[in-house]
Amino acid sequence: MTDDIYSEVHPNFNRDGSKLVFSYDKRSMDEGRKNGKWTYDLAFMDYKSGAIEVLDIFHGADNINPQYDDEDNIYFLSDRDGYRNMYHYRVSEDAVYRMTDFLTGLSGIGRFSPAISAAKKRDRVLFTHYYGNEYIIKEASREDLLNEPVDKIAVDQAAGTLPGGIIQEDDIVASNLINVERTYQQIPENFAKKPYSNQFKLDNISGGVGAGINNGSQFGLNNGLQAAGAIQLLFSDIVGNHQLVGQAALNGTVYDFGGQLFYINRKHQLAWGGGISHVPQAYAIGRSIYLDDREDSNGNVFSLGIDEIQVLRIFNQSASGFLQLPFSSTLRLEGGMSVGNQSFRLDAQRTIFDPVTGFLLGQENERIITPDELVFNQFYTIRKGLQGSMYVAFVGDKSYFGLTSPLYGQRFRISAERNLGINDFIAFNADYRKYFWMKPLSIAFRAQAYKRYERDVTSLYPNYIGQMGLVRGYDFMFDRRQPGEFGDVGFNQLLGSSFGIASIELRVPFTGPKQLALIGSNVFFTDIALFFDAGMAFNDFSDIIGSDLPSPPVLAMSVGASVRVNLFGALILEPYWAYPLQSNSRLVFGLNFIPGW
């Protein structure tokens, strides 16, 4: 309907469709800015001929959102006096009437968002008024409004101008607005031109490192220099199409040094990337205190006390790549593959002491020669060798995060994984989560099923459903019970290569932004939750029904309450109290270091 360099917004037909009214910036663009800005006038278009007539009404002000009423007169918004209010142009009279006089004005969400709507079959108009931190929709007829006649060419926006201060200083903003056209003409034309470059530059650096001397520890660690910490570097080009992420971490000795380097290319819809990594993991797998007979250089035999801890370090080196194909901002298909090598090292760290006095005499470290395979128990065997994996996943995320956990929406992940080499298995995972927001409460539900088909015992430890927030109340780390003392449930009954879980939570934002939480705070963000968890770990489906195992899988359930604390965006803690729904159970305390699911 139009084809020019000007802007035409908010079109609206009259009752018979013969005329169109809209907001038009042609006169402002042709004559120049008023008070430092281009503005919109009202304009008519004859639909058949396409002829356009600009009305001489409040030129220099923004006149937007025109609406024909039931008599083919026009309601519109204007800020002619510094406030945006509603006016009524009566065509037969060629006169304008002010219909509202709100100090906060009428407005939509944005500067040029529509805020009024008029009926064409009866005397009725609706408009939005922002007041008290909320938008209020009001309905009225012409007789309900002011109907105050005003001069249709009078524009005075002094009320919308900030007053000057007592100190007589140059008003840089006002002077630049007045001289904006002149300033534009004075801009030199010989700017230096440089071609776009996707060269990497450092965008962010984070982390920290500490070091210290360990001397005479009672826990069996070596004397000498110990260091811990991590550092992460993010490099990117100027538009973020290419990113390079590097991370290095140290936790103890030189054997505990790890790092990874990843590249991501997001220039096209199909994003891709890859990286390399070296990840060490240290485990204390046994401790023993005993007497050892030693012989000195003179042939004298004497006994020494030995406090020995066996430390297993598993090293994984890998190279990986991935692809991501987004279908929308909330839905994507992704896949990847990796190849690598796994090795391990077993050390005996011994603290030597006098068995009579208990005084520390020294420390020693001995590497224990091991075969390429270590069998720990029926669940876990670790091996040296090559390994590879590939996966594909369908991922959706339409959730919105609150203070410590998602607040409303939903998300899911359906994936399949194939591993070869020392870990030979196929795994399937289906995870769905739904959140209902009923201010100030949120109800969260999740259901997850994970099944791993193994050809042999792998180097992957079986899933334990009492950890990482799966089924709370079955984690003995912060409880005095020993493994195996979960009421009438044994520890082995909570282990398996596969599992299924379901949870429901009632969440209340407790402290945080006052628009969201019960108690307003700009620093301390917490949620309170009441929960019910249920889950079962198993190896084969046949273990669940009709199993003749001495310790068959059990359905672990618990109820309780938790408090999630957001530590300045760096870490989320969740202390909880849970009651396992098993006979001979009692209330237990636990602590998770993860965000709410």
Image (cartoon, rainbow, N blue to C red):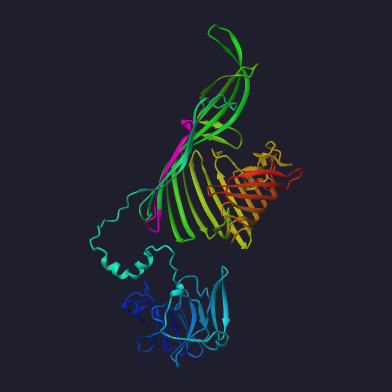
Q: Position of residue 158 (x, y in %)?
A: 44, 74
**Residue 413 shows in the view:** yes
Q: What residue is at 54 percent from the left and 38 percent from the top?
A: 459
Residue toward you, 423 or 248: 248
Q: Residue furthest top?
A: 298
Q: Residue furthest bottom?
A: 92
- Residue 364 falls inside the magenta stretch: no
In the drawing, does residue 492 fall left or right of residue 318? right
Residue toward you, 172 or 444: 172
**Residue 318 shows in the view:** no
Q: Residue furthest right?
A: 584
The correct choice, above or below, for 40 with respect to 401 in the image is below
The correct choice, above or below, for 107 with respect to 215 in the image is below
Residue toward you, 32 or 416: 32
The part of the chain drawn in magenta is: 244-271
Total numbered labels placed on residues in the image? 0
In the drawing, does residue 262 fall left or right of residue 293? left
In the drawing, does residue 379 fall left or right of residue 170? right
Q: Assign the N terminus to one quadrant of the image.
A: bottom left
- Residue 261 falls inside the magenta stretch: yes
Q: Position of residue 40 (x, y in %)?
A: 39, 78
Residue toward you, 16 or 38: 38
Q: Position of residue 19 (x, y in %)?
A: 42, 88
Task: Name the magenta segment's main secondary structure.
Answer: strand
The correct choice, above or below, for 307 with respect to 542 in the image is above
Q: What residue is at 54 percent from the left and 75 percent from the top?
A: 129
Q: Position of residue 168 (x, y in %)?
A: 39, 63
In the drawing, does residue 245 fall left or right of residue 425? left
